[in-house]
Image (tube, rainbow, N blue to C red):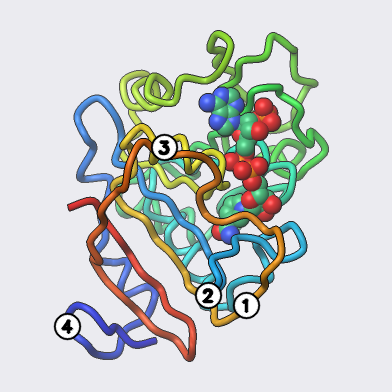
């Protein structure tokens, strides 16, 4: 892997992320919030309805590396239904590395769901490792899960600003990584909550109806600045931030 910006030269995912310490920068009443997406050159965020075929092995390594740098990882219900997550860090060595840098063993897995219509047979719920917190507007009761599960209910829809405040104030979350999808990303951007955007640009064209990394209206144009740009073969790894 090469770093193109800043300071061009050889690097690795691990070296690059070693300098990234988001837990040291909570934003007052809320955590620092980063979002990670992989997209094709024509801006599509899925191939065949899922994200896996977009990026290369280096993209998977970047995602796995990012997961070791945050107190919490968050997804929307649409992503949970499409991707059927398991335990967010499935490698004991990586969990121990987190503890050595002062992070909890497992990140808190956060899901945002209006209807609580989730794939309860997915390994995230049946595996028994880690902790899951669901923000929902539904009054429905979830089935019993092997994994520790907590439900936080909001009225009519989840208030994302309040949810982020609750994570910081009541759960001590200092830094949160949102892995999508496009619906939840729109809400976070619309509320001005995204500090860092990690975007993998995969050298592929897909066309068709696949979603982009934001699906929904934004209140205006958001200007971003490029914090770093990495390259492996024809794939680019950008980190953008709000100036
Ligand atoms: N390329 C990538 O890096 C990437 C990353 C992630 C996902 N994806 C893809 O994106 C697709 C899913 O997109 P999506 O936009 O449907 O997913 P999403 O953003 O993960 O989920 C949308 C759902 O989240 C819930 N939600 C979000 N905000 C809410 C609020 N304020 N209050 C209540 N509920 C709220 C709603 O759940 P309910 O339906 O329960 O009401 C809504 O339907 C999948 O195909 C996935 O593979 C791609």
Crowding near pointer 3: few (<14 within 10 Å), some, many (20+)? many
Horizontally, residue 18 falls left or right of residue 68, namely left
Assess mark 1: CB under 8 A from ligand 1? no
Write the residue at 47% across / 41% down.
186
Q: Residue furthest right?
A: 121
Q: Position of residue 38 (x, y in %)?
A: 53, 65
Write the residue at 55% across / 8% down.
155
Front one among 150 and 195: 195
Q: Residue 7 carries which label?
A: 4
Choose the circle earlier in sequence order: 2 or 3. 2
Mark toward the viewer: 2 or 3:
2
Quarter of the figure with residue 123: top right
Residue at label 3? 188
Front one among 232 and 216: 216
Choose the circle earlier in sequence order: 3 or 4. 4
The relative height of residue 120 versus residue 115 in the rendered view (above or below) is: below
Q: In 3D space, how far apart are the residues under numbered discs 2 and 3 (Cα atoms)?
A: 23 Å
Helix, strand or loop at disc 2?
Answer: loop
Helix, strand or loop at disc 3?
Answer: helix
Choose the circle earlier in sequence order: 3 or 1. 3
Q: In 3D space, how far apart are the residues under numbered discs 4 and 1 (Cα atoms)?
A: 30 Å
Residue at label 2? 41
Q: Where is residue 239 in the image (x, y as percent from the top left)?
A: 32, 64
């Amino acid at each position: 892997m090469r770093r193109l910006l800043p300071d061009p030269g050889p690097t690795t995912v691990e070296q690059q992320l070693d300098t990234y310490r988001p837990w040291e920068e909570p934003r007052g009443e809320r955590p620092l919030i980063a979002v990670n997406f992989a997209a094709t050159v024509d801006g599509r965020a899925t191939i065949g309805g899922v994200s896996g075929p977009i990026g290369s092995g280096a993209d998977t390594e970047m995602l796995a590396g990012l997961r070791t740098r945050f107190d919490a990882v968050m997804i929307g219900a649409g992503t949970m239904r499409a991707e059927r997550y398991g335990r967010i860090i499935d490698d004991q060595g990586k969990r121990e590395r987190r503890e050595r840098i002062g992070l909890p063993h497992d990140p808190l897995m956060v899901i945002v769901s209006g209807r609580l219509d989730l794939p309860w047979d997915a390994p995230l719920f049946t595996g028994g490792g880690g902790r899951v917190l669901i923000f929902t507007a539904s009054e429905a009761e979830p089935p019993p899960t092997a994994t520790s599960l907590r439900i936080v209910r909001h009225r009519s829809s989840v208030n994302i600003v309040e949810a982020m405040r609750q994570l910081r104030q009541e759960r001590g979350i200092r830094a949160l990584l949102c892995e999508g999808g496009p619906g939840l990303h729109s809400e976070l951007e619309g509320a001005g909550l995204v500090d860092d955007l990690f975007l993998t640009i995969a050298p592929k064209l897909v066309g068709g109806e696949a979603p982009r990394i934001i699906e929904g209206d934004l209140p205006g144009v958001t200007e971003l600045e490029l914090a770093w740009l990495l390259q492996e073969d024809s794939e680019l790894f950008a980190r953008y931030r709000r100036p």
